[in-house]
Amino acid sequence: MSEQKKYDKQYFLDLAARIYDLDVDVYETLGSSLGRVFGADRDRCVAELASLMRDVKGESGAQLAGADRQHGPNAARR
């Protein structure tokens, strides 16, 4: 039986923080020619991005379970 992953508020906050940090890394590595995606401070951007993801997918995140199977860390092995 497969285990259902829980998508709660903390999951979305962690994911949003990772996305924000990736944006910073790309900007610092490639320079300003691409610009930054997120212009506000980290806390505000992370909170807003997490809220948007929760609004789109719902608190249960049931639709995300399929995305994890398709794009998760082991997707290349399938």
Image (tube, rainbow, N blue to C red):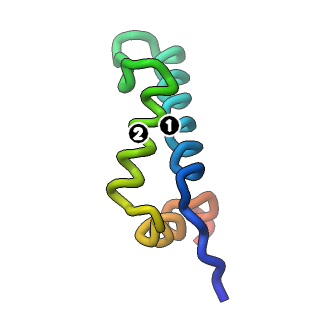
Tell us which disc is closer to us: 1 or 2. Answer: 2
In this figure, what is the number of numbered marks?
Answer: 2
Nearer the observer, 31 or 47: 47
Mark 1 touching mark 2, by CB under 8 A?
A: yes
Three-letter code, disc 2? Leu
Q: Is residue 73 above or below residue 40?
A: below
Q: Is residue 12 above or below residue 5?
A: above
Identify the residue shown where x is 51% and y is 49%: 12
Structural crowding at the residue carrying mark 2, measured as other residues with C-alpha within 10 Å and reported as few (<14), some (14–19) or many (≥20): some
Q: Which residue is mark 1?
A: 19
Q: Quadrant of residue 15?
A: top right
Report the Cα–Cα distance between label 1 and label 2. Answer: 9 Å
Residue 10 image offset from top left, x and y in percent: 59, 49
Q: Which residue is mark 2?
A: 49
Residue 59 image offset from top left, x and y in percent: 45, 62
Three-letter code, disc 1? Ile
Identify the residue shown where x is 39% and y is 19%: 40
Image quarter in which the N terminus is found = bottom right
Identify the residue shown where x is 39% and y is 10%: 32
Identify the residue shown where x is 55% and y is 58%: 8
Q: Quadrant of residue 5?
A: bottom right
Residue 75 image offset from top left, x and y in percent: 56, 64
Dot 1 or dot 2, earlier in sequence: 1
Q: Is residue 36 above or below residue 17?
A: above
Q: Is residue 52 left or right of residue 60?
A: left
Image quarter in which the C terminus is found = bottom right
Q: Secondary structure at mark 2?
A: helix
Residue closest to the far top: 32
Q: Is residue 55 left or right of residue 6?
A: left
Q: Secondary structure at mark 1?
A: helix
Structural crowding at the residue carrying mark 1, measured as other residues with C-alpha within 10 Å and reported as few (<14), some (14–19) or many (≥20): some
